[in-house]
Amino acid sequence: MSTLKNTWLRRLFRWHSWLGLLTGVPLLLLGLSGAALVFKPELDQLLAPRVAAPPVGRAAVPLDSLYRLVGRRYPALKKMAIVGFPQQPGDSYEFRLYGNDGNPNTYDLASVWVDPYSGRVLQEGPNTGLAGGALNWLLQFHFCFQLGMGGVLLTAVLGLALLASVATGAVVYRKHLGKVLTLRAPLRRHNWRVLASDLHRYVGTWALLLNALICFTGFWMNLFGFDPAAWRAQTHPAPPNQLMARPVDELLATARAAYPALVPTRIRLPTQPGAPFEVDGTVPGHALPWGAGAAVQVDATTGRVRAVRRAWEAAWPAQWEALMGPLHFGTFGGLPMRVLYVVVGLTPGLLALTGFALWYRRRPRLVGAARAGR
C-alpha cells in the first residue's frame, strides 16, 4: 500500500513539475498583467486624455450628440458603451466600441475619448495598440493574449492548468501545509537551491486558496472559448449601424428615475435594432461583493423600462455570474483586498521561477537516471 501511495505521489509531483514548466511563462504574464489591472480604474483616471477647463457657465454637450458622433465615426459596430465618465473638471468620456471584422483571430475592441464640452475626439484607437489606451491594451492581453478567440481558449486552458497545479501542489506538499501556515517551518538560506525550495513551498501555501479562486474565475469567464457557436459568431462581420431614434439623455433620465440610488459605471448604447439601452452601476450599501451588480434596462424604441436588476436579489445562476468579475479582480473588499490581490497576482511568477530552479537542480539526477535505464 505504501509503495502504491509513493508511486502516485511521485506521479503527481511529475505532473506538478511539468504543468509549471509548460505554463510558467504565460502564467507569469497573466499574473503581472492581472496585478496591474486590479487598479485599472485609478490608472485609467490618471492616464486618460485631459480637456481644457470649460468657460464658466458653458454646458456640456448632450450625450446623445456624442453617441451619434461616435456612431458616424465608426459605422459598423455590434454595440458601444460609455465606460468612463467625467468626475471632475478636465475629465473626458470614454467610449468602448465592440466591432467584428469577421476574423476569429482578432478581438475587435476600440476606445474613444471625447471632450464633454466641445464634442472633440481627444484620442482613439483599437485596443490592440496603445492608441486605445495602455490599460485597455493590457486588459485585452490579459483576456486573450491579443489572439482573438484562440487566445480566449488558451487563457481558459491556462486557468485550468493553474488550478491543476494548485491541486497537485497541495497534495504533494500536504505534510508541510500546517507547518508553513503556523510559521513552524523555517525559511532556510543554506544555498540558492534550498532557498528556492522553501520559497516555493511558502509562497504556494500562503497563496493557495486565493490563487485557486483567481484561476477558477478566470477560467469561468473565458468558458465561451470552448463554445463553437461563439467561434461562428466571430465570422460574421458587424452590420452597418442603425442608431436608435430616441435621445440618449431621455433614456438615461428614465433609467435614473426607475432606480434613483444607482450610480452609473457603464451605459450600454445600442447600435443594432432590438438591442436595449442599459445602465449598469453600483448601489451604496451593496458594494460587497457585487461591485457593479445592478442595472436598469430600457426599451430603446418605446422608452419604457424593461427591467430593473439587482444581483443580490437575482436567482442563483445570475448571482454566480455577477460574482465572477469581482472575485477575479478583487474589487469587492476595498483597498486592503485589492493590495492582497496584487501580491497574490505576482505569486505565479515567483512560483514559476522557484519551480524552474527546483527542476533545474534535479535535472542532472534525472538525466543520470535516464542513462542508467538504457
Image: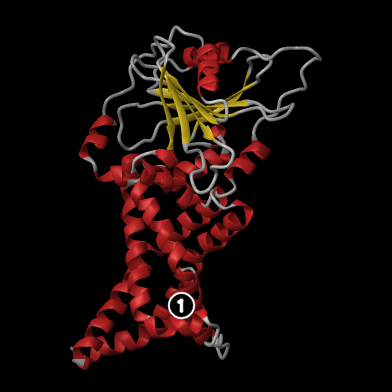
On screen, residue 27 above or below 280: below
**Residue 332 place in picture, x, y as percent:** 54, 49
> Viewer-proximal residue, 51 or 123?
51
**Residue 25 place in picture, x, y as percent:** 43, 61
Residue tagged 1 = 357
* Quarter of the image where one finds residue 300: top left
Relative horizontal placement of residue 106, taking residue 12 as reference (left or right): right
**Residue 264 place in picture, x, y as percent:** 56, 29
Relative horizontal placement of residue 118, taking residue 319 as reference (left or right): right
> Viewer-proximal residue, 102 or 82?
82
**Residue 126 place in picture, x, y as percent:** 48, 31
Q: Is residue 303 visible?
A: yes
Relative horizontal placement of residue 54, taking residue 78 as reference (left or right): right
The residue under the point 35% across, 63% down is: 163
The residue under the point 41% across, 42% down is: 322
Q: Is residue 26 visible?
A: no
Q: Amino acid at mark 1?
A: Ala
On screen, residue 176 above or below 145: below
Q: Quadrant of the C terminus?
A: bottom left
> Viewer-proximal residue, 176 or 156?
176
Q: Quadrant of the N terminus?
A: bottom left
